[in-house]
Amino acid sequence: MIRKTKKVTINGAGLIGPYLGILLRRRGFDVEVLEKRSDIRKITAEVGRSINLVLTSRGINALKKINRWEEVKKITMPVSGRMMHSTSGELTYQPYGGEGDVNYSISRTELNRFMISEAEKLGVKFLFSTDVKQIDETKNLLILKNEKGEEVSHEFEVLIGADGAGSVVRKKILKLQNVEDKVEWLGVSYKELFMPTNADGSEQIDKESLHIWPRGKHMLMALPNLDSSFTMTLYLPEKDSEVNFDQLKTPESVEEYFKTYHPDSIPLMPNYLEDFGQNKTSKLGTVRCSSWSHNGKMGIIGDAAHAIVPFFGQGTNSGLEGCVVFDEIFDRYDSWNDLFNGFFDSYKSNADAIAKMAEENYIEMSEKVGDEKFLLRKRLESFLHEKFPKKFLNRYMMVTYSNIPYSLVYKIGMKQTEFLNSLKIDKTSDFEKIDLKTVESFLDQEILPLIKV
Ligand SMILES: Cc1cc2nc3c(=O)[nH]c(=O)nc-3n(C[C@H](O)[C@H](O)[C@H](O)COP(=O)(O)OP(=O)(O)OC[C@H]3O[C@@H](n4cnc5c(N)ncnc54)[C@H](O)[C@@H]3O)c2cc1C
């Protein structure tokens, strides 16, 4: 029973675990968070992990819920659009949304540190360098490997896995339910590189944009950091493609790749060959699983339940939104089992929808952003948004700047695409001649009633 529970154990002090800890602590539980890494606040540089990410409406909404958005906002870099770099170095800018619509780039480490400290202030207890090795749900026991490398047992009442895409809690839940645990790999991996600032500390490229070098099945991306440097991420198929990571095993082959596909990025990254050799290559995948809990004793949340590929910048945002939903439905239930099931029923379809949209966005970012037809559609969408700022939001705007449930965003996006196709716009069309009455009546009759549900 929820009311009889004193202690909740969360596995994982990534971005989601500490936030959930705050919400549960506010409800009066003793909350402990186990984390296999050492305390991130005591480490100067984080090796091998993406150093920045983008916060948008859903993440911001979660931070507002705990009255911390204004504080976090101060350590973000606002990003208002995409800057495309062609092979010949030409630049094309696409604003993300309408006026005032910005994404916020933030250091993952700083956000993680902030969340842990905020949770600790409320009395959430953290056990770092504590690796959960086994779960015995029949005895409510965890086998942990502690800082000294010793295996110790540890009691839990309720265990929530916020332990990321490789979650041990998810593996245990699925094993108990005889379901295979599988990550759907995209076949695309990423590697991080670095663009420093100019000698005077200024930025080398526009820092209010996310930069993309789209090249078909592969792309380079740059997101600004607070100090005006940029984190670069190279996305490439692992193999079986014209260009792939498998081919880039020597500095010569890496140099050849950059000279051929991203020549204007070379002077921006003086150490790219060393970075390429030293930084790890990581795989990207999607977690879709049929259960997020077992018998009210164990549940999962965040990437552990629904890791997605990063092409919509929504992994953390959706994980935080999931926690908000978990908290909002909390009071409807008396048992953890019903609460976990209620959470699955409320959020699984949204997790599935953003997973699908994130996969689709890989194609959009790597292949379509430079495509004429795509750019025409984007211009049309911007035109309609200008005419009907409250009524017409394209899919990107709905995902990024609204809190409309992802599953509804998907449905609305499909309806809008069908309607925009019916307008038969081509590059010779004059947008001013579009019959705006027809557009408005479509929006009023087909779209707005869905959003108001
Ligand atoms: C290249 C890239 C770019 C991204 N960009 C964005 C972006 O712009 N915007 C966005 O919203 N999302 C982005 N994401 C997604 C985001 O990183 C994840 O969704 C988010 O980190 C998930 O948080 P989490 O706390 O659920 O999992 P994690 O951050 O993975 O944290 C899990 C924690 O659990 C710990 N742990 C794991 N196993 C154990 C164990 N057995 N015992 C104890 N502790 C354990 C881990 O050490 C870790 O600290 C990006 C992802 C990638 C790969």
Image: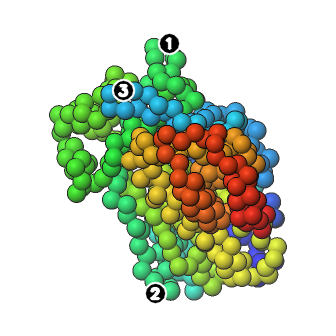
Q: Quick check: marks 3 and 1 in contact, CB under 8 Å?
A: no
> What's the CA distance linking mark 3 and mark 1?
24 Å
Q: For the residues marked 2 and 3, what is the alpha-carbon distance in whole angstroms? A: 53 Å
| Mark 1 surroundings: few (<14), some (14-19) or many (≥20) residues within 10 A | few
Q: CA distance from mark 1 to mark 2?
A: 59 Å
Viewer-closest of 147 and 323: 323
Viewer-side residue, 59 vs 98: 98
Query: Which three-letter amino acid code belongs to the residue tagged 2?
Result: Asn
Task: Determine the image quadrant of residue 326.
Answer: bottom right
Q: Secondary structure at mark 1?
A: loop
Q: In this rendering, would 178 be left or right of 68?
A: left
Looking at the image, is 421 positioned above or below residue 264? below
Q: Residue at x 39, y 37 (%)?
A: 213
Asked whether the residues under the numbered discs 1 and 2 touch, taking CB atoms below 8 Å apart as contact, a structural biologist would say no
In x, y percent, where is residue 117?
A: 68, 46
Upstream in sequence: badge 3 or badge 1: 3
Labels 2, 3: front one: 3
> Sequence order check: which comes first, mark 1 or mark 2?
2
Name the residue beneath numbered marker 3.
89
Q: Which residue is mark 2?
A: 178
Disc nearer the start of the sequence (2/3): 3
Distance from mark 3 CB to nearest ligand 1 atom below 8 Å: no
Q: Residue at x 24, y 33 (%)?
A: 260
Query: Crowding near pointer 3: few (<14 within 10 Å), some, many (20+)?
Result: few
Asked if 79 appears above or below 342 in the picture, the reply is above
Residue 101 rendering spot, x and y as whole percentages: 67, 39
Quarter holding the N terminus is bottom right
Residue that numbered label 1 is attached to = 200
Question: Dot 2 lies on which element?
Answer: loop
Q: SS for tag 3?
A: loop
